[in-house]
Amino acid sequence: MARHREAVCRLCRREGVKLFLKGLRCFTEKCAIEKRNFVPGQHGQARRAKMVGYGVQLREKQKMKRTYGLLERQFRSYFEKAVRMKGPTGSNLVIMLERRLDNAVHRAGFAGSRAQARQLVLHGHIRVKGNKVNIPSYLVEVGDEITLKDKMHQNAMVLEARNLAQSQGLAPWLDIDRENFKARVVALPRREDVQTPPMNEQLIVELYSK
């Protein structure tokens, strides 16, 4: 599976906003946005050019893609599915991305970032309703119970993620038992549940509708 292999902090700098791609690091003074909030590259420290129209729409699409760790073809596939669903296309898109298993594992506090969550899923450490699921794009449903394999409960990365999650807000669509590394999907996520980072999905709809 193709993935972004370069320094992810450059992605936050390119978008000019924290995408929370590095877990705990994003909440410390080591965060790239805190240290050098300008576009990476030779001319990055020049003033950001004011964007209008297509440029604004493109940056919004890139921000959402990078937040959820997707490449263009996969992101476009989600958009096409969102178009065919009932309701606002933009909200449908965000809700589908939130329902991804790797995102749910991250929201539950089992991993400090979606990249870490994807690794846990791919390596077979996550169970859904008691069954191993190693597909990060698996869409969780109401009633699904997500658990972490017992032998990972004392993993340093997992424990650090749990400590970080305890100081962050909860995902209201998940009933989380952090002590036992369990989370149950009690409702489908709503658009208003997703506040960080701020995204304007309507601009993405306008971009793909051209």
Image (spheres, rainbow, N blue to C red):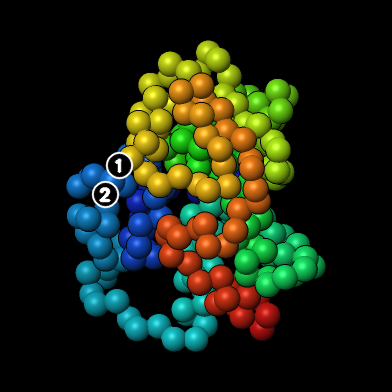
Q: Residue furthest top?
A: 151
- Residue at left offset 47%, top offset 28%: 178
In this rendering, position of residue 167 left or right of residue 188: left
In the displayed structure, 31 sits above or below 149; it is below
Q: CA distance from mark 2 to mark 1?
A: 6 Å
Q: Amino acid at mark 2?
A: Cys
In this rendering, position of residue 100 left or right of residue 150: right
In the displayed structure, 77 sits above or below 5; it is below
The percent position of residue 190, horizontal first and vertical second, equals 60, 58
Label 2 vs 1, first from the N-terminus: 1
- Residue at left offset 34%, top offset 65%: 16
- Neighbours of disc 1 within 10 Å: few (<14), some (14-19), many (20+): some
- Residue at left offset 58%, top offset 47%: 173
**Residue 201 shows which numbered tag?**
none
User: Is the C terminus in the top left, top right, bottom left or bottom right quadrant?
Assistant: bottom right
Label 2 with label 1: CB-CB less than 8 Å: yes
In the displayed structure, 58 sits above or below 137; it is below
The percent position of residue 112, horizontal first and vertical second, equals 42, 37
Q: Residue furthest bottom?
A: 53
Q: Dot 2 corresponds to which residue?
A: 31
Q: Nearer the viewer, residue 181 or 208?
A: 181
Q: Amino acid at mark 1?
A: Arg
In the displayed structure, 131 sits above or below 49; it is above
**Residue 25 shows which numbered tag?**
1
Q: Nearer the viewer, residue 22 or 184?
A: 184
User: Is the N terminus in the top left, top right, bottom left or bottom right quadrant?
Assistant: top right
Residue 137 visible within the image: no
Q: Quadrant of residue 120?
A: top right
- Residue at left offset 46%, top offset 36%: 109
The percent position of residue 93, horizontal first and vertical second, equals 65, 62
Say what secondary structure mark 2 lies in.
loop
